[in-house]
Image: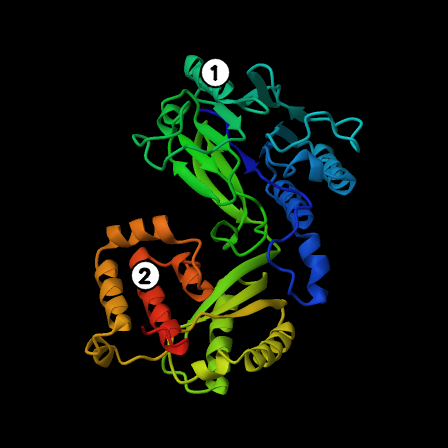
Amino acid sequence: MGPTFRFLHAADLHLDRPFRGCARVDPAWVPLLRDASLDAMDRLIETAIRERVAFVILAGGICEGSAVCGLRPQVRFRAALERLSSEGIQTLLALGLGDPSEGWEAIEDWPKGVHIFDDAAIDRVVIERGGEVLARVFGMSYPTEASLSDLVESTRRESDPLGVAIVCHSHGLPPDPEGDSAPGVSLGDLVQSGVSYWALGSSMQPAVLHRDPWVVQPGSPQGRGFEEADLGPHGAYLVEVKAGRVGEVRLISLDGVRTVRLVLDIGGIADLDALHAAVITRVEQLRGENPGIALMLRVILTGCSSVRSEVTDRARLMHYQERLGAELSLMEPAIGLEQLVDMTQPVMDLGALRGRGDFSAAVLEQGEAMAADPEVAAAFLRAHGQPLPLPEIARWLDAPLGDEPSTAIQKATMLAIHELSSQGRED
């Protein structure tokens, strides 16, 4: 029988990194957004203490570049590690390429129980409890392709069932162990090594890349914008080891502010009151799916209906945005409105358009043919997505809602025809 214990795996704290694309939010949200990464770190520490873990792994990304790792995040970081130390919880830290390499200006010494992995050689730490070996943890700081290969080879030689390897690197690792990867180390190399758990970093999104042996990237504890990688829950992985084997690996949410893109099709909606009711219904659904979390919304209107004439009027749209933001601000927990985005399409009689035989009809024919073949649609997007002279069309080709290529082409086609009609460009 082997040991039974827990550990926590986190990475990419990116302390004090600002939110992206949130310049338009209500000023009341500024303190919450400013401190979100630091508050997520505090929740990480509270989780480690509550779950009585044996150690915490931090796989790099404490800062996002040494130039932005100021005194405030350094002081808060050391205080967080001191809390772990006072509870007898060890911290194993592998520094990443964005972390300070010339020392930490505000940290003269590290608390007891903090181990920072070497950057010149493969390092190993033995974790014990009451004289029993719980795990042997391999790691290195500031990894390069060559040193990562050395780490994999070192773990393969050890072939340690209690082994855990830390590396603040996940780029180039495909989801399939047999797939292609960047030069150097593949996911297959990690799977075939001799350790039971690879603790990766350098990724915003949490993911389990392989099970038994485990290859895991926790992502950042706090999303910071509306890009795909920032959306949804963010946190750290709680790892349960039972009888010497990794059993359960569970994501623990740590984010205090969660960004959400609320996409609403206006089809069948006749006026602004009906639109407002539909938005509030979706907001209530989101609150149920994200209990106890402060949400920051970007509401994106798509589709076509008679209400489009109101949302394309900028003055009316801004007035409705103020109304919606005021109502959302009264909810508990807080819900913020980052912006309301009009991505609706004009209502068109496609049958009549096809029969006109003009340039718009030709655009429709080409667009429909392209959208019918996903590979052709994807190739067109890669070649011609940007730059384009009409931003209304370019935004669809950039597929900001995560559309499939064919869907993006269909939407861009409709907007192109609308632009041709509205600007009199039919010759």
> How far across and down, in percent of the image, does residue 194 sit?
41, 20
Location of residue 359 by image quarter: bottom left
Determine crowd level at label 1: few under 14, some 14-19, many 20+ residues with C-alpha closer than 10 A: some
> How far across and down, in percent of the image, does residue 129 sit?
60, 25
The residue at the far top in this view is 157
Residue closer to the observer: 307 or 118: 307
Find numbered disc 1 in the image and state the secondary structure of the residue it sits on: helix
Residue closer to the observer: 177 or 247: 177
Location of residue 412 by image quarter: bottom left
The image shows residue 65, relative to residue 257, as above or below, that is: above
Relative to 59, 39 lies left or right: right
Determine crowd level at label 2: few under 14, some 14-19, many 20+ residues with C-alpha closer than 10 A: many
Report which residue position mark 2 lands on. Answer: 409
Q: Is residue 8 visible?
A: yes
For badge 2, the amino acid type reads: Ile
The image shows residue 59, relative to residue 127, as above or below, that is: below
Find numbered disc 2 in the image and state the secondary structure of the residue it sits on: helix
For badge 1, the amino acid type reads: Asp
Residue closer to the observer: 253 or 178: 178
Residue drawn at 59 percent across, 22 percent down: 128
Relative to 52, 86 lies left or right: right
Q: On the rendered image, what quadrant is the C terminus found in? A: bottom left
Q: Which mark is residue 150?
A: 1
Residue closer to the observer: 196 or 155: 155
For the rendered model, the colour scheme is rainbow
Relative to 364, 158 lies left or right: right
Q: On the rendered image, what quadrant is the N terminus found in? A: top left
